[in-house]
Image (spheres, rainbow, N blue to C red):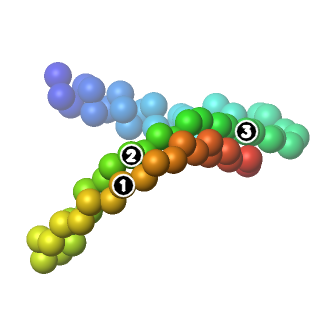
């Protein structure tokens, strides 16, 4: 069963780039979201931790 699943995934990945090969022209995309951070804990490689607090709400926007 695992071999069949693995073979199906490989076949899907092999055919995926060809799915949009016939399209031409320019493409513009915009994405947006809401970023709400209030507390983060950061740990370094030696095991020391620091707590960061934020009181902001952000709106990330990407244009591609």
Q: Secondary structure at mark 1?
A: strand
Which residue is tagged 1?
53
Which residue is tagged 2?
38
Q: CA distance from mark 2 to mark 1?
A: 5 Å
**Does residue 10 appear left or right of residue 21 in this picture?**
left
Q: Let me know if residue 61 appears in the view.
A: yes
Image position, residue 26 (x, y; %)? 86, 43
The answer to the question of whether label 3 and label 1 lie on touching residues, with beta carbons closer than 8 A, is no
Q: CA distance from mark 3 to mark 2?
A: 26 Å
Q: Let me know if residue 18 appears in the view.
A: no
Q: Is residue 19 above or below residue 57?
A: above
Toward which corner of the image does residue 12 lie, by quadrant? Answer: top left
Mark 3, other Cα within 10 Å: few <14 / some 14–19 / many ≥20: few
Frontmost residue, 26 versus 12? 26
Image position, residue 27 (x, y; %)? 81, 41
The answer to the question of whether label 3 and label 2 lie on touching residues, with beta carbons closer than 8 A, is no
Q: Looking at the rendered structure, which numbered label has been put on residue 30? A: 3
Q: CA distance from mark 3 to mark 1?
A: 30 Å
Depth-wise, is mark 3 or mark 1 nearer the camera? 1
């Amino acid at each position: 069963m695992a071999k069949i699943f693995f073979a199906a995934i490989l076949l899907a990945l092999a055919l995926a780039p060809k799915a949009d090969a016939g399209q031409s022209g320019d493409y513009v995309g915009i994405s947006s979201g809401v970023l709400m951070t209030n507390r983060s804990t950061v740990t370094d490689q030696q095991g020391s931790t620091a707590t960061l607090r934020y009181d902001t709400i952000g709106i990330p926007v990407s244009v591609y």
